[in-house]
Image: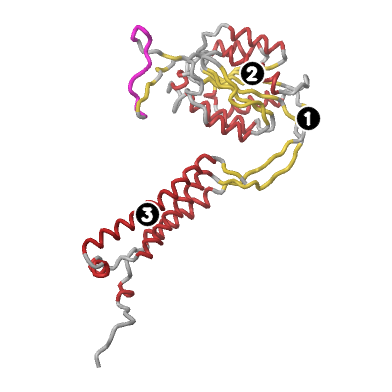
Amino acid sequence: MAFEHPYILYLLGAIPVLILSFLLYLRWRKLTMQKFGDPEIVKQLMDSPSPVRKWIKFSLLLSALICFIIGLANLRVGSKKEKVTGESAEIIICFDVSNSMLAEDVKPNRLAQSKFMVAQLIDKLAANKIGLIVFAGNSYVQMPLTHDARAALMYLDGITTGSVPTQGTAIGSAIETALQEFKEGGTDDERKGRAIIIVTDGESHDENAVEMAKQAAAMQIKIITLGVGTSEGAPIPIRRNGMIDGFKKDRAGNVVLTRLNEPLMSNLAAEADGEYRNIAQGKQVISDVAEIIDGLDKTKDGEYAYSDYANHFQLFLGIGLLLLIIEYLLSDRKPDWVKKINLFEQHEN
């Protein structure tokens, strides 16, 4: 049992504050009523508000809030857990997070389209060890090589153009970082197939890229390049408060157009016995890349634990919604039929 987003549970810290605030409100209300006169007479003039019902309604609201917080944190329970021995290759995905990936010549933009495609690719390659590198002006290991495809998807979801502070498109640096990760985080078995998948628009001014591709080939590591964007190109939008507030310009004040550099990407793939694909081809790209990876030499891995989690966020969100409906339907005042009951009323003979 575990939470997918445990940091959301910090919101539960607001519960004691809300309870204290409610108690202070009741005390303020009581003192205010006392200023108007006899509390019992004031209650009658104010249509008999029920303190008990106020507590019930507040408790319902509080419980609903707790359910919503737990639901957003997504409680997951392992429905299956076992140790398996798998045969796999080692795959490192290098993901371009430069500002040019915000261009909208593919919808909604290059970055979002690439993340959607890579998520499908990770699902397809889940039996292999997968690592994730992000790059712009520099490159960093976002996730080391692992069999945990769910973790890869989680790291992928968090990728933005702010993941690397230095701008640029240093493809050579990304390949170099990937080669180092194979040495440090990969297996020592030289028979294991390895591949680098580079997802980028190819707008690189890095002359080292081809040389690093040759080094990869010398280590018998394939390079598969996936291009995103169009050869016609598009400007890079500048957004403020979610709205486009202009486009990136060069020093001369001209709007910069960013274009897909397919010749470079094809060249890099050819240098390392790989292939180039444009993600505009959709599902065919997934099938082609999976076929290339399946053709790599596979070696047996050691045993590792595998858990298949069942999500339970729907249960808590449903309970929270039900509690809100009950709270909405429950009045904080005494029903009319209760007001008519007076056990101490004296009847005249």
The disc at residue 276 is: none
Identify whether 315 is placed above or below 113. Answer: below
User: The disc labelled 1 sits on which kind of residue?
Assistant: Lys
- Specify start and end residues of the magenta stretch as a single range: 242-253
Q: Secondary structure at mark 1?
A: strand
Q: Secondary structure at mark 3?
A: helix
Residue at 47%, 49% (x, y): give it.
Answer: 68
Which residue lies under the disc numbered 3?
22
- Quarter location, residue 49: bottom left
Which residue lies under the disc numbered 2?
178
User: The disc labelled 3 sits on which kind of residue?
Assistant: Phe
Identify whether 295 is placed above or below 137. Answer: below
Q: Position of residue 250 (x, y in %)?
A: 38, 10
Gap between marks 1 and 2 measured at Cα: 22 Å
Residue at 62%, 19% (x, y): give it.
Answer: 224
Q: Position of residue 243 (x, y in %)?
A: 34, 28
Which residue lies under the disc numbered 1?
300
User: The disc labelled 2 sits on which kind of residue?
Assistant: Ala
